[in-house]
Image: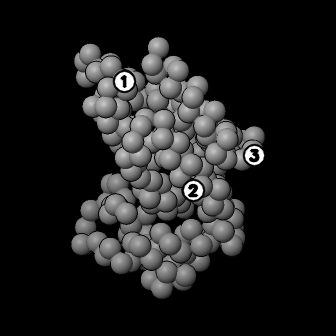
């Protein structure tokens, strides 16, 4: 798990243990209370910290929930499974499993809805979740090029656009499948999705 430091905070040294307790308590509250009933006061009580400790770290519920959910996505890994198809299938199944967790599902849906009218929150989601997980696409593409499964990138700008496109396709498909359509992203669906994605990449 990556160490996390909420953006835009300065002042006294951070306590990693306090941060971990607060983020874990936030996820617990999301499961037990849901988005609408979650309060920073309840999170502070669950984490065993003073409310002032929590407010020094996060300015409000939106930012706190983004960081709590982002920590879940930091669990994603891309082990080398021997082929691009197997690598994609493995990480997509991990992604779907995270989205199946109540704290991820309720937290992500809530902050995305709030971000439609909050530019700063939308940027925090992009920085804390989206941009952080694009590392997986970059790793997978580099590995596939080394295996000869994909042609080498012609230039950095083209490579960056491709990484963005692949991420959008994977994240969009899995989020829509699991959170909008409420259908299982099981192994059969993941294999079919991967086949379609690879056909596009190789063309």
Q: Residues within 10 Å of mark 3 (few under 14, many from 20)?
A: few
In whole angstroms, how far apart are the C-alphas of marks 2 and 3?
A: 14 Å
Q: Tell me the residue at 57%/29% (across/down).
A: 195
The number of numbered badges drawn on the structure is: 3
Horizontal side of 120 relative to 101 (left or right) equals left
Between tags 2 and 1, which lies in front?
Answer: 1
Please provide percent x and percent y for residue 124.
43, 47
| Residues at marks 2 and 1 touching, judged by CB atoms closer than 8 Å | no
Q: Secondary structure at mark 3?
A: loop
Q: Position of residue 68 (x, y in %)?
A: 49, 62
Coloring scheme used:
one colour
Q: Determine the residue positioned at 65% across, 56% down.
A: 100
Can you tell which mark lies on residue 182? 3
> Dot 2, crowdedness within 10 Å: few (<14), some or many (≥20)?
some
* Depth order, front residue of 18/44: 18
Label 2 or label 1, whichever comes before in sequence order:
2
Q: Residue at x 55, y 69 (%)?
A: 26
Q: Is residue 173 above or below residue 58?
A: above
Question: Which mark, residue 150?
Answer: 1
Secondary structure category for the residue under label 1: loop
Q: Residue furthest bottom?
A: 48
Q: Which residue occupies the foreground of this view, 51 or 87? A: 87
Q: Would you name the residue on which mark 2 appears?
A: 98
Crowd class of label 1 (few under 14; some 14 to 19; many from 20; radius 10 Å) = some
């Amino acid at each position: 798990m990556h160490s996390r430091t909420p953006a835009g905070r300065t002042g006294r040294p951070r306590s990693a243990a306090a941060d971990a307790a607060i983020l874990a308590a936030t996820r617990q509250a999301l499961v037990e209370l849901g988005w609408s009933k979650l309060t920073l006061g309840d999170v502070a009580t669950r984490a065993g910290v003073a409310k002032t400790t929590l407010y020094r770290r996060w300015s409000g519920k939106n930012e706190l929930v983004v960081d709590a959910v982002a920590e879940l996505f930091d669990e994603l890994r891309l082990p080398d499974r021997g082929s691009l198809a197997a690598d994609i299938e493995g990480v997509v199944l991990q992604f779907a499993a995270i989205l199946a967790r109540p704290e991820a599902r309720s937290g992500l849906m809530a902050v995305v809805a709030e971000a439609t009218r909050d530019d700063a929150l939308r940027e925090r989601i992009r920085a804390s979740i989206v941009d952080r997980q694009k590392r997986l696409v970059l790793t997978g593409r580099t590995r596939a090029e080394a295996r000869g499964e994909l042609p080498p990138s012609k230039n950095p700008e083209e490579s960056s656009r491709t990484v963005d496109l692949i991420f959008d396709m994977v994240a969009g498909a899995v989020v829509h499948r699991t959170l909008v359509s409420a259908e299982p992203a099981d192994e059969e669906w993941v294999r079919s999705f991967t086949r379609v994605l690879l056909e596009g990449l190789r063309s």
